[in-house]
Structure formats: structure tokens, C-alpha cells
Image: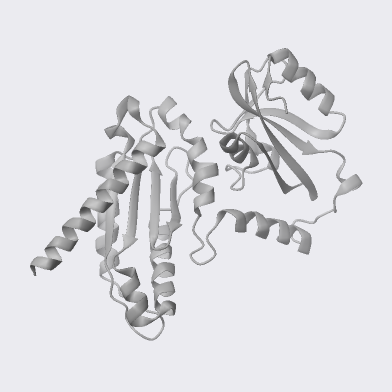
Amino acid sequence: MKTNYTRAEAYELAESLKEDFKFVRIVDPAERSVYELKTCLKTDEVCHEIWDRCERCENCTSCRAMQTHKMAFKLDIKDKQTYLVISKYITIEGRPMIMELISGEPDDLFIDSSGDDEVSCLINKYNKLIITDPLTDTYNRRFLDEHFVTSLSCCADNSIPLDIVILDVDDFKKINDTYGHSAGDAVLKDVAAYWRLHFDSREKDRERLVIRYGGDEFIIAARGPSLDEFTGEVMDAYREMRKNSISDGMRKVPFTMTFGIAGSSELGDDFTWDRLFELADRRLYENKSLMGRSHSEE
């Protein structure tokens, strides 16, 4: 399947697809920008405005297509109609872009939706399930890989700091073995709810996300604050957390957590998500080792 186009070829393709799709547009999901079809010049339009939303779509097919270099699909709702959205990865004169196709006349294919009927609810529920962890209701690793990581280029381009913390529950297996798996689940749910309460924001350039990376391990990512500011916020929140007991409904379940914190400011021009994650992960491991040695000396 052809993916490399000149501007003229991309425009010709878009014009030919207009016969079958209600909307055809070129977008850059990292910048949330829409580009004029004929000239490929950036417009003032923000990509998610077409859905009458003030925030980026959480289940963004364009982010997914940019990440995989393939096509991505979803159902979405606009003006009480249900649409099929197709995002196709292309390059226009060497620049990675997305050609976004939104289905033609919906009464030919789709169900008229009121926005709160059973069909709409099922679509919205399905879209949410794709990107969230069912136990903790935080974002999942798929959201991190396909949505968040693909949007990071704008941080470097606009000199916006990005800080992350990898955190996990110490000796989580011991909690399960001692108190049972229901208690372990209760700890994970309460831990996630606490960090979401303090670190969950979609404010532009101050975005904060809580993600369950796997098992008892979570990631908090924050755009905007300095590394010192972010570190202080994380540790202050943890100190407050330690004042409260987490319970499985019957018993108090004691636990501690270990952190690995890193910021893009430490990497300078060498910043990539992989390097940032590796630095935070290494610090998590080092802090775990220090904690293990301190316990053995007691």
C-alpha cells in the first residue's frame, strides 16, 4: 500500500476520497493541527474541534496510526450521528502525517444516535475500555504507547518540560500472600484513586496522567513543571498518603511505595521517551536496592 506522497499526489488522493467520505483532512496528531489539503500549510483548526470537544480525543486513531505506521479505525459520534473514522499513515514529501477519513452519509451505513441511547453508550464504553485499566480505571499501557508517547514531540519543539515517576508497591506479592488477592486489588484501586485525585489534569501544557504500566507498577507523567517542582509534589503527596490507611473493607493493609523520578531537563538534546523511561526505571531499581539494604541492616 502506497504511503509516500508528494503534495500534489496527496491532494489528488484526498479529492478522490471526498466522493466516499464526509470529511477528508490531513492532521498532525502530535501538534493536534489540521493542514490545508492543497498546500499542506497548517491552519488554525485544532483536530478534535470537529467533534465539538475542547480536549484531545482519548481514543485517538490518528495517534495510533502515527505510532504503528498503519491504518487505525474507530466509531465516534457527532451531531447525533455515528461515524466510522479511518486514520491512514502517510508521508508527504518525507514528513509523517495522517490522512483522516470520516464516513460518508451516515444514514447509508450507521444508526442515528441521540448521544445517550444504548448504541452511543456502547460505543463510548468500548472506546474507554480500549485505553483504560479495568481494575483501577487509570489509563493503560496501550494509551501510553499509542497516544501519549506519540504526542511528545511538541514538548521538545516548544521547550515544555516532561517529568515522569515510576512507582510501585513494595513487596506486593507479600500483601497478596498475607491478606489475599482481594486485599491486593483493594490496595491497587486505592493507590490509583489517590494518585489520580492529585495528578490528573488535561490542562494544556500542564497535562498530568496516571497510567497503570503493569502489575503493581504505575507511571505518572507531567508536562510543564520543573523536575524539582514535580519531585516535591510527588513526595508531598506520598507523605500525605502514608497518613491514611488503606483497607480491603475489613482490615488495614500496611504498605510502602518506591519511586524512580526523571525529567527531560536532565537529558537536554538527547531527550527521547525511551531514555527518560530508562533513567526513571534505573532510579526505581536503585531505590529498591537501597531500601532492601536498609531493611537487612535493621
Residue at point 82%, 28% (across, down): 17
Examine the image and state in which quarter residue 134 appears: bottom right
Question: Along the line of sight, which residue is nearer the eye, 160 or 67?
Answer: 67
Residue at point 33%, 35% (across, down): 264
Residue 73 coordinates in the image, percent (x, y): 71, 44
Residue sticking out furthest to the front: 1
The C terminus - image quarter:
bottom left
Residue 238 coordinates in the image, percent (x, y): 28, 60
Residue sticking out furthest to the left: 297
The colour scheme applied to this rendered structure is one colour
Asked whether residue 246 is in view, the answer is no
Asked whether residue 256 is in view, the answer is yes
* 39 relative position to 222: left or right: right
Residue 215 coordinates in the image, percent (x, y): 42, 62
Residue sticking out furthest to the right: 108
Residue 10 coordinates in the image, percent (x, y): 73, 19
